[in-house]
Amino acid sequence: MSEEVSNLLGNQLLRATVSRFEADRQEAMAIIDLYLNSAVGIGDHPNIVHEIHKATKMLAEAEDALDALRRHFFDQTREEE
């Protein structure tokens, strides 16, 4: 496999991974917002604190992962140019 094709594939995989973590981040934020600002979400889940806790962990994991990818891969690309 040539370096150009490998680079293209690597960039696509990296972008796909970033997109997945961004989607997880948005989902977690939507869940937290729903529980904090909508009575509809509260009726379905009797343990709101537990649900917000789970969504907060999901949010933190996604943001940490995005930061790590950007720090180790996106910054590295700029330094090499």
Image (cartoon, rainbow, N blue to C red):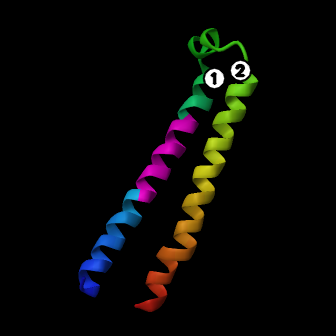
Q: Residue at x 58, y 16 (%)?
A: 41
Residue receiving disc 1 = 35
Q: Position of residue 75 (x, y in %)?
A: 51, 79
Q: Are marks 1 and 2 in contact (CB under 8 Å)?
A: yes
User: Magenta span has 27?
Assistant: yes
Using the image as rendered, state which of residue 40 and residue 4 is in the foreground: 4
Quadrant occupied by the C terminus: bottom left
Q: Which residue is mark 2?
A: 48
Against 49, residue 69 (above or below) is: below
Question: Which mark's residue is nearer the viewer, 1 or 2?
Answer: 2
- In terms of secondary structure, where does tag 1 sit? helix
Q: Is residue 63 left or right of residue 17?
A: right
Mark 2 is on which residue type?
Ile
Q: Give coordinates of residue 36: x percent, y percent.
A: 66, 24
Q: CA distance from mark 1 to mark 2?
A: 7 Å
Q: Which residues are magenta?
A: 17-29
